Amino acid sequence: MGQKTKRNRISLCLIVIGLAAVSMVAFAHHGTAISYDQDQQITLQGTITEFVWRNPHAQLWVDVTEGQYKGQNFAIEMNSPAVMLRWGWTRSSMKPGDEITVKVHPSKTGRPVGECLNCVVDIKGKPTLKPTDNAGNQ
Amino acid sequence: MQNRFARSAAAAIFAVFMISSLTLAQRGAPVAGPPHDPHDLGGIWLAAGGGARSTGPQPDARGFLTDGGLMTEWGSSSPLTPAGLKAVNANISGKGPRGVAPVYANDPIGDANPPGLLRELVYGRPFQLIHTPDKVVQIFEWTRVWREIWTEREMPQDIDRFWGRWLGYSVGKWDGNTFVVDTVGLDARAWLDMYGDPFSDQLRLTERWRRLDRDRLELVLNINDPGTYTKPWSTVPKIFRLQPKGSANGELQEVIFAPMDEKDFNDKIRDPAGKP
């Protein structure tokens, strides 16, 4: 076996160990992560009907206009307000009537509920909302 | 090729440096860095990275070790007693190796009950330590609670009068540069961690806090709980990092879980997400 191949294998092992550690940490701190399909993300487009800025986790409610949940009011579990506040978000970052696109992990039950903890929200006509890396675990 | 060699050499030197630093720190040797008073733990601290993990024996899929212990968020425990195993099976968590959808779990905090001291300590949210003449006050952001660690007194003989406290009754004293905190009275309805790992009302908890340098604080627990574990065990070190004033975590937020908010979240999000 060549030195290069050996080095590549060692690198691969280190990457796998690193990813395993990261995923363990991520898993450990997700509020209700077990209920959602963490291997799948779906894109929702629609209009916000309510943004609930309360503990334990913020809630975002969207009237979906495209895709499999079209016509349904979809509930999104977001991060906790204290963490989002450290990202620079506030209760007025999103408002009813805003047209958004967002990716969520859907509920395993198929009901119109999803999870978006480290969430990126594209809002029509406004700057995209993103998390930053300066907050603690959720 | 030369670049590759240089990169490998640099990585090796860095690794040796890191290992040496950690080893020195664990032995209590002075660590280079900005000046600090090792007896001043004051400031806001946040866990560096995730929860403490053991690098020792690996657990099975349900978190059990081959010797009958548990892989907890604090690291590997000693073997469980029969009562400890019964408690493990009674605690149904929405997280971790035995986790189920939270709607089917019985985690006390799912109904906005207090997490208790051990979950406050292991959860990744900032806390503040404040020294006063007769006590150290620890304020936790998560659930916005505080505890007093009395420094001017010994642990009383009659500890039964402290029974049933979510944050316990604590007495602390310095052993060299380590602040040793003895805690009794912890309410065993709380859990050891978010996985539902248990403790009993026989728990005698010892915390050993040590400032490794200006920016890092180490915590090691000794769990002495004959009601749950066959022998005392120590956790893997957990490291906290000082949060500078003006930084995102340099000020504690208000994080209170009002039962009415928890119920609203459970009814509208948690339960529909997990129950067909």
Image (spheres, rainbow, N blue to C red):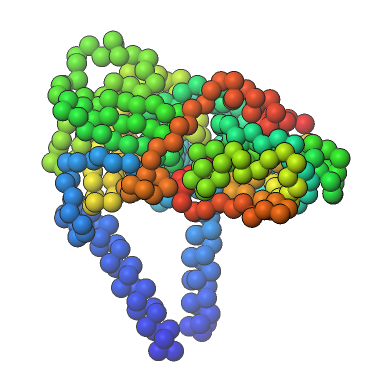
Query: Please, is residue B4 above or below residue A77 in the view?
Result: below
Q: Is residue B126 visible?
A: yes
Residue B39 percent location from the top left of the image: 17, 41
- The residue depicted at 36 percent of the width and 17 percent of the height is B165
From this view, report whether residue A120 is shown above or below residue B136.
below
Residue at image location 37% in from the left, 73% down from the top: B11
Could you tell whether B15 is left or right of B209 in the image?
Answer: right
Q: Quadrant of the N terminus of chain B?
A: bottom left
- From the top left corner, tell me how far across and down residue B72 is, in percent: 45, 38
Q: Position of residue A122 (x, y in %)?
A: 69, 53
Q: Position of residue B75 (x, y in %)?
A: 40, 42
Residue B90 seen in this snapshot: no
Furthest toward the bottom, the residue is: B1
Q: Is residue B225 above or below residue B174?
A: above
Q: How many marks?
A: 0
* Residue A111 left/right relative to B255: right
Nearer to me, A79 or B23: A79
Of residue A13 and residue B46, the one placed in the foreground of this image is B46
Between residue B65 and residue B213, name the one nearer to us: B213
Extreme front residue here?
A125
